[in-house]
């Protein structure tokens, strides 16, 4: 059994910042995530997509944000348990017992759920021939855009991911964007830029079409798209990228007896505690009046949740707020030499 002050479920940006806020208060955290690395959606879906609303950082990618957060918490020597999923939570006196699918058992007075939108996977192309090309010629996220350099790429989708990657890959690839409707859900500015590229002959745009067949054995050679009038178009391509959105799964969290509200967890705004004492929810998975699903909102939620975690983990100690700039104790925890 692993005893700790806090079990954090989710290693996305908000979960990582929670490690920092707990660490500067002298609390130890164990982090569980069902993905194989830290970063959550930022790494899995948008590693190269720019983020513009992190305070004091004009622009960074999801990958850069994750790397910097990991660097920030390095002094705390946090244990990460990747490819693990919390299966069961039970109470024992003033503590929670957390069991994973790999039979690891944790004991802690606090649990912070920072699981974003829960476990997720992309919606996939439903054609039978699509599965054999997964991870080879068909992708639902991009980890390295240079893989598609000087290649023919067909992108499916009408949201921000599809539009953003069409714009980005048009700089290095021959791109065709296909959407099943005329209307797009993504940012109008990005769509306008794509339409300019279409007029210039740098991007092909096909609306009211869906994929109907895939040609190619080991690798995709071409695809056929079809509209409602049964008009078909064959497109030669090296790669297919599908951005159809995500299938969200809360998994066992939905069975913990928490106040659920449309696949999110209701919390109070004093400390982001749920209806279960010692269980907190921060980031996209929590909801409260005025909630904004922003990373910076999650950072604020992590900071306040960490205070209550301290009070529960150290009931005989008085919590003292300290500025990091003036506290020698905090600077020492961060591995800094106090001035």
Image: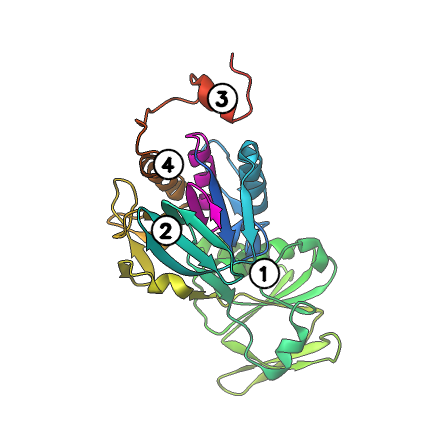
Residue 128 x, y percent position in the rendering: 60, 83
Label placed on residue 141: 1
> What's the residue at 30%, 45% (across, down)?
272
Label 3 close to label 2 by CB (< 8 Å): no
For this orientation, the residue located farthest to the bottom is: 230
* Disc 2: which residue: 96
- Residue placed at 51% from the left, 11% from the top? 339
Q: In this rendering, would 36 be left or right of 302?
A: right
Q: What residue is shown with label 3? A: 331
Query: Is residue 133 shown above or below 29?
Result: below
- Mark earlier in primary sequence (4, 2): 2
> Which type of secondary structure does the marked residue at label 3 adopt?
helix
Q: Which dot, 2 or 1, sits closer to the camera? A: 2
Q: Earlier in the sequence, mark 4 or mark 3?
A: 4
Q: Nearer the viewer, residue 227 or 32?
A: 32
Whole-number angstrom distance, CA of label 3 to CA of label 1: 39 Å
Asked if residue 134 is among those painted magenta in the image, a careful observer would answer: no
Name the spot of residue 48 as percent of width and height, x first. 59, 49
Nearer the viewer's eye, disc 4 or disc 3?
3
Q: Residues within 10 Å of mark 2 (few under 14, many from 20)?
A: many
Q: Please state the extent of the stretch shown in magenta in the rendering.
A: 1-26
Q: Secondary structure at mark 4?
A: helix
Q: Mark 2 to mark 1: distance in Å?
A: 36 Å
- Residue found 35% across the figure and 41% down from its top: 301
Could you say which quadrant of the image residue 264 lies in?
bottom left
Q: Which mark is residue 10?
A: none
**Cα–Cα gap, marks 3 and 2:** 30 Å
Between marks 4 and 2 in the image, the one whose residue lies nearer the viewer = 2
Q: Is residue 157 above or below residue 44?
A: below
Please give the label number shown on residue 303.
Answer: 4
Q: Does the magenta-highlighted stretch encompass residue 19?
A: yes
């Amino acid at each position: 059994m692993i005893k700790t002050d806090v079990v954090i479920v989710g290693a996305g940006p908000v979960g990582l910042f929670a490690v920092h806020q707990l660490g500067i208060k002298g609390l130890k955290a164990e982090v569980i995530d069902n993905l194989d690395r830290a970063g959550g959606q930022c790494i899995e879906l948008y590693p190269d997509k720019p983020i513009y609303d992190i305070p004091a950082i004009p622009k960074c990618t999801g990958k850069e944000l994750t790397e910097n957060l990991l660097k920030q918490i390095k002094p705390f020597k946090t244990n990460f348990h990747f490819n693990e999923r919390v299966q069961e939570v039970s109470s024992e006196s003033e503590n929670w017992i957390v069991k994973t699918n790999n039979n690891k058992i944790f004991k802690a007075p606090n649990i912070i759920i920072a699981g974003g939108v829960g476990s997720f996977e992309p919606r996939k192309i439903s054609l039978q021939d699509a599965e054999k090309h997964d991870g080879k010629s068909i992708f639902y996220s991009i980890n390295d855009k240079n893989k598609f350099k000087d290649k023919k790429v067909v992108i499916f989708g009408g949201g921000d991911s599809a539009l953003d990657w069409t714009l980005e890959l048009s700089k290095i690839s021959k791109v065709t964007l296909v959407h099943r409707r005329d209307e797009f859900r993504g940012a109008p500015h990005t769509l306008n830029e794509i339409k300019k590229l279409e007029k210039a002959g740098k991007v092909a745009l096909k609306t009211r079409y869906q994929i109907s067949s895939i040609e190619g054995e080991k690798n995709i050679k071409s695809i056929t798209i079809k509209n409602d009038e049964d008009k078909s178009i064959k497109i030669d391509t090296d790669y297919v990228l599908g951005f159809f959105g995500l299938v969200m799964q809360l998994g066992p969290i939905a069975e913990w007896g928490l106040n659920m509200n449309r696949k999110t967890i209701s919390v109070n705004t004093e400390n982001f505690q749920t209806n279960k004492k010692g269980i907190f929810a921060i980031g996209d998975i929590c909801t409260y009046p005025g909630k904004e699903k922003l990373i910076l909102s999650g950072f604020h939620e992590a900071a306040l949740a960490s205070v209550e975690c301290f009070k529960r983990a150290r009931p005989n100690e008085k919590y003292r707020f300290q500025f990091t700039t003036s506290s020698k104790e905090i600077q020492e925890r961060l591995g800094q030499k106090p001035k």
